[in-house]
Amino acid sequence: MFSPATIKERRQYYREEWNEKDLPEFISENIWMREFGFDHYGKGPNDRYKTFKTPKHLRMFLRSKSPFAGYISVAFYNNPRRRDDWVKSEFVFDVDAKDMPIRSCNCDNVCEICLDEARQLVLDLIDTLKGDLGLKDIHLIYSGRGYHIRILDEIIMTGEAEVRGEIVKYTTGAEIPKNSVPIGYTKLFNERTKRNILNLTGKEIIDGINPKLLKDTIKNRDVLINNNWGIFQERIGPRRYKNLINSFARVNLSFVDAKVSIDLKRILRLPSTLHSKVSMKCVEVKNPETFDPFKSAVPKFVYERK
């Protein structure tokens, strides 16, 4: 399934399966304000500054070119062909299953296990974005090898990169709390860090954590199931515990691509198009709790392969 799509398969997909109705409404309703980019050769988006007045114009382009990959800007412009006269930008979290620093599988690319772990992670992030920050206009996109959380609340879309960076650090648990009272941000940081410690396999290479500390962390992590951080600290030792927590603050952040979140002019995979490297569709996720990419994001040509 995860082998690259051939040009014949891409043509089949865009001419027989792709439908403009598969474009999310948050894209189609202001499509003329977006920049599009395309990768025709599998080497990255080299065809930029494209614009389309309507989804029908996009359909004609896709049927004609059958690109290796399609992208769309998170930004809205009054002049998207020149990326000029910026209006606002979506706020995005990019989680790629193959790049997660801690995952229980050993696959070379992506598999059912790490994709589901990525889905569980984005569910946690969305809960925080809604519950702690009060954001509501949130859309989840399966990107082919992970997930994009795309946020269109007006209050955040005009925010600068610095503000977005602070939200990313808060949401992921990337800063060590200044107090130990287990409420608010301290609770969130503890939850993110506990989850990652409990998911360690022992094969990870983490900056600031030597093999002995990694082994001892796994050996003593059982007490964290009941949030006994004091006992855990005693077992690890104060100095090593400090090193461990500093390292895991960085680990927490590395589950998302922070550069994507703060880039106001970033382009992302266009929902409804192919991720041709893995022969999967990039699709909007209507129900994150039950979404299964192997049922909802596999193009028909995959089933027709010999």
Image (cartoon, rainbow, N blue to C red):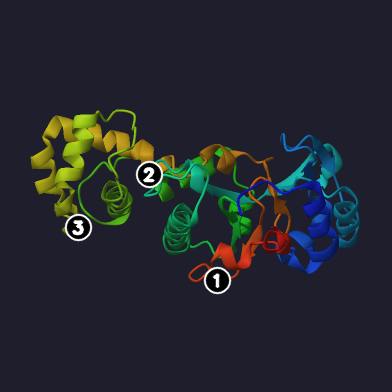
- Kindly identify the residue that appears in the image at 85 percent across and 44 percent down: 50
Image quarter of residue 238: top left
Callout 1 amino acid: Asn
Q: Which residue is mark 3?
A: 225
Q: Which residue is mark 1?
A: 287
Q: Which residue is mark 2?
A: 102
Question: Does residue 77 appear in this view?
Answer: no
Pick the front one: 24 or 85: 24
* Mark 3 element type: helix
Residue 103 percent coordinates (x, y): 39, 47
Disc 2 residue crowd, few under 14, some 14–19, many 20+, Cα 10 Å: many
Q: Which one is earlier in the sequence, the residue at label 2 or at label 1?
A: 2
Question: Does residue 216 appear in this view?
Answer: yes
C-beta proximity under 8 Å, tags 2 and 1:
no
Disc 3 residue crowd, few under 14, some 14–19, many 20+, Cα 10 Å: few
**Mark 2 or mark 1, which is nearer to you?**
2
* Mark 2 element type: loop
Disc 1 residue crowd, few under 14, some 14–19, many 20+, Cα 10 Å: few
Residue furthest to the front: 306
Pick the front one: 217 or 178: 217
Pick the front one: 284 or 291: 291
Callout 3 amino acid: Ile
